[in-house]
Image (cartoon, rainbow, N blue to C red):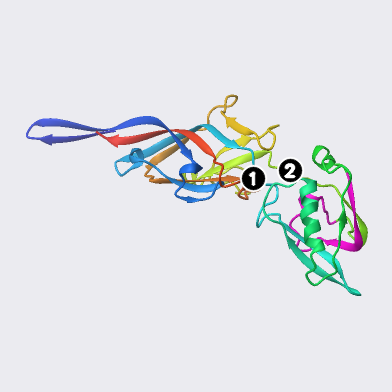
Amino acid sequence: VYACTYIHSIFIMQRSVTSAKFITISGKNKVSGNAAEFTVALDRANSDNHTLVAINPVQASFPHLFYNIRDDVNNILNVELPNGGGTIIRQLTFPEGYYSLGTFLNQLNTFLSTPIGHDPVSITSPTDLNTAIQEPTKVISFTTDLPISLQLAGTTLNEVLGLTANTAYATTTTLQLIPHFNTPDEVYIHSSLTENRSIGSDNKHADLLDVIPLGDVAFGEYIRYTPKDTPITRYDFNSGRMINSLNISLRDSSGAILSFPDNHYFSMTLRYEYTHGK
C-alpha cells in the first residue's frame, strides 16, 4: 500500500509493511478465566501501530484430562427414594470431574446413604466396575437394599448413564444401565480472533479457530497436535484487525465449554501476519 506526498518538489513515499511472526499463547499466562476458557494479553506486536491481517494455527498441546461430568452440563440426577411409608424425589448434584463407573457409584452411594428427607439406601456395586469403561455398550446391573427409581425429568446425566425416554425406570431394587463415561472425541478451539466464522448450520461454532481430534489418546496422556495431514487453516482479515488481547475457549461438539483441572494448561502456537507503518 503506497501513499504519495509532495513537499517542495521532493517526492516522499510512505508504505505499510507486512511482517509475520510466531507467538505461543498459553492458559498459564491468562489474565482471566480458567483452564478451558481464558484471555491472554498480547505484546506490542499487536499494539496501536500494528494491524492483524491473517493468522494460522500451527501447533497445540494440552493434557487429555477433560471431565466427563461437568457443572451445568451433565451433573444432575433425580432419584425417587423411600420416605417412611411414601417416597420423595431428591436431586443429586455430582461434583465436576472425571468418573469411572466405580467412582460414580461410590459417589451415588454416598448421596443415597446420607438421609436428607429420605430413608438411607445402600448400593451393591457390580463385581467388575471396569467392564463399563472397556465395553461401553454392555448392560451393567447394580442393586439397592431399598427400592429406588431414576427420574428422567430434570436429569442431565441421561447420556452418561444411558438413560432413555424409551425405557421405564420403575421403582426397583435392581437397576440396569448402559453407561457412557466417555470424554470428547474432538476439541473445538474457539477464539475471539475468528468471530463470525462458523461451521455447520447450527451456529454452535461461530468463532472456530481449529478442531483437534483426540483419537485413541487415553485419559491422562499429553497431546501434541500439528495439522500434518491437512492444509493449515488460514484466516484472512480483509480490513485488518487491531487486537490487544485474545480469548480462547475449548468446547465439545455441542458447543459446550469443556472442563479440566486449573493446574494444567492448553497452549497453541500461531503464525500471524500484520501490517505496520514504516
Horizontal side of residue 37 vs 117, given as left or right: left
Quadrant of residue 21 in the image? top left
Quadrant of residue 92 in the image? bottom right
Mark 2 residue crowding within 10 angstroms, few (<14) / some (14–19) / many (20+): some
Horizontal side of residue 93 vs 16, given as left or right: right
Horizontal side of residue 232 vs 148, given as left or right: left
Mark 1 residue crowding within 10 angstroms, few (<14) / some (14–19) / many (20+): some
Front position in the image: 113 or 157 = 113
Front position in the image: 246 or 71 = 71
Q: Position of residue 236 (x, y in %)?
A: 45, 36
Which segment is the magenta one?
139-165
Name which residue lies at 87% across and 42% down. Answer: 128
Q: Secondary structure beneath disc 1?
A: loop
Horizontal side of residue 193 vs 1, given as left or right: right
Name which residue lies at 54% across and 48% down. Answer: 37
Q: Which mark is residue 252?
A: 1
Which residue position is annotated with label 2?
182
Front position in the image: 6 or 73 = 73
